[in-house]
């Protein structure tokens, strides 16, 4: 073999080795690329997303840019029945944000404040006060286990719940959550599991309302999600006065928080009325409520300036305005205590007896 042929073969072999080395290096880099990408910190919008349907990778930059280009359309808030009826145009001396209000001295039945108190409006979750009253008066075993089913899922408003289908809890726990945290599935389960079923339960709700003199009140279900559950401030004051006599309803509605064990989980709930935590308030019974047709609602029994008061606020305009209205009433009552009774003059006979 000539020297030139030998050199040519060596050169070819070196070239081939270099090529193999380059190919091996590229294969190693390509093989490690996914692992490196997964381990690398994700910064900003440069992370790639795997498209579920096409299998193609789509840059998050593109997704964000697409979202920015889309027009954001505000969903109009449905006006409440009270607003549609023009009830918010009514004036009152406290400039309340609720279109309907009623404040009564529980002991004397004196009306301290009244605003559209005979108007019949949706009452939202104030309904649950009657739900709890009917269950309590039925003397059902409160330690009996009831199960949340698909029938308890809200199809009226599509609201959510942490009580999943299949959750088991006692009747007492369901009532506690319904009153304190306005748990819709718990309230519906109370009616569904009542002897005779839901129709019998709703019938008893309406019968109890008639018995109490709540003649403007109608119930169609136990949660308040339906706008066909309607009442007036006057009727609700009667309900609050009656419910206040039930110690279980007083306790459950005013507790500040509650924990319930559900399987391996422990659910923590808070009261929907933050006034129960305020040292300025002595609340004996309360219930809040809201659906768009009803606005923000609140009923309470509270001791203010030594007086036991029943307060009803319906169709309040803002999220916290019902609580603001309660605060306005409290300050007003504290600033205007009832006039001291003037002692009657003694009769002539009494005077003569004293002098004699």
Image (cartoon, rainbow, N blue to C red):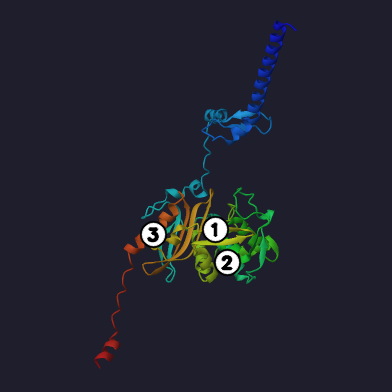
Residue receiving disc 2: 133
Q: CA distance from mark 3 to mark 2?
A: 27 Å
Q: Is residue 280 left or right of residue 182?
A: left
Residue at 66% from the left image edge and 58% from the top image edge = 167
Q: Is residue 73 above or below residue 130?
A: above
Outermost residue toward the right in this view: 1
Residue receiving disc 1: 268
Task: Give percent across and percent down for residue 224.
Answer: 58, 55
Residue in the foreground of this view, choosing between 177 and 24: 24
Task: Give percent across and percent down for residue 315.
Answer: 48, 52
Q: Earlier in the sequence, mark 1 or mark 2?
A: 2
Task: Give percent across and percent down for residue 140.
Answer: 64, 70
| Mark identifier at residue 27 | none
Instruction: Kindly report which numbered mark, 1 or 2, lies closer to the viewer in this rendering.
Output: 1
Marks 1/2 in contact by CB < 8 Å: the verdict is: no
**Whether residue 325 is visible:** yes
Task: Give percent across and percent down for residue 178.
Answer: 57, 60
Q: Earlier in the sequence, mark 3 or mark 2?
A: 2
On the image, which quarter does residue 19 sit in?
A: top right
Marks 3/2 in contact by CB < 8 Å: the verdict is: no
Q: Earlier in the sequence, mark 1 or mark 3?
A: 1
Residue at 52% from the left image edge and 71% from the top image edge = 247
Q: Is residue 50 above or below residue 132?
A: above
Q: Is residue 235 left or right of residue 105?
A: right
Outermost residue toward the bottom in this view: 356
Marks 1/3 in contact by CB < 8 Å: the verdict is: no
| Mark identifier at residue 329 | 3
SS for callout 1: strand
- Classify mark 2: residues with Cα within 10 Å, few (<14), some (14-19) or many (20+): many
- Classify mark 3: residues with Cα within 10 Å, few (<14), some (14-19) or many (20+): some
């Amino acid at each position: 073999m000539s020297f030139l042929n030998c050199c040519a073969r060596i050169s070819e072999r070196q070239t081939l080795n270099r090529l193999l080395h380059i190919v091996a290096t590229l294969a190693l880099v390509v093989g490690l690329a996914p692992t490196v990408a997964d381990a690398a910190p994700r910064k900003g919008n440069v992370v790639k997303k795997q498209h579920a349907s096409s299998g193609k990778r789509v840059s998050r930059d593109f997704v964000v840019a697409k979202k920015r280009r889309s027009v954001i359309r505000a969903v109009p808030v449905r006006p409440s029945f009270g607003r549609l009826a023009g009830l918010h145009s009514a004036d009152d001396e406290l400039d309340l944000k609720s279109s309907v209000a009623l404040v009564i001295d529980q002991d004397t039945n004196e009306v301290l404040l009244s605003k559209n108190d005979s108007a019949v409006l949706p009452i939202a979750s104030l309904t649950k006060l009657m739900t709890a009253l009917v269950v309590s008066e039925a003397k059902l075993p409160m330690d009996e286990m009831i199960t949340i089913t698909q029938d308890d899922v809200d199809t009226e408003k599509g609201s959510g719940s942490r009580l999943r289908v299949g959750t088991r809890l006692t009747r007492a726990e369901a009532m506690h959550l319904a009153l304190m945290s306005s748990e819709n599935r718990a309230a519906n389960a109370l009616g569904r599991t009542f002897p005779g079923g839901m129709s019998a339960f709703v019938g008893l709700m309406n019968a109890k309302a008639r018995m109490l003199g709540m003649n403007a009140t109608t119930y169609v279900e136990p949660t308040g999600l339906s706008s066909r559950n309607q009442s007036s401030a006057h009727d609700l004051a009667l309900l609050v006065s009656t419910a206040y006599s039930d110690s279980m309803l007083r306790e459950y509605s005013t507790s500040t928080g509650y924990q319930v064990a559900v399987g391996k989980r422990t659910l923590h709930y808070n009261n929907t009325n933050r006034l129960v935590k305020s040292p300025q308030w002595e609340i004996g019974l309360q219930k809040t409520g809201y659906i768009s047709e009803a606005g923000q609602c609140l009923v309470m029994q509270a001791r203010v300036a030594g007086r036991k008061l029943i307060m009803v606020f319906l169709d309040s305009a803002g999220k916290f305005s019902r609580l603001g209205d309660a605060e306005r009433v409290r300050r007003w009552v504290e600033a205007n205590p009832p006039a001291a009774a003037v002692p009657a003059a003694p009769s002539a006979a009494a005077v003569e007896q004293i002098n004699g």
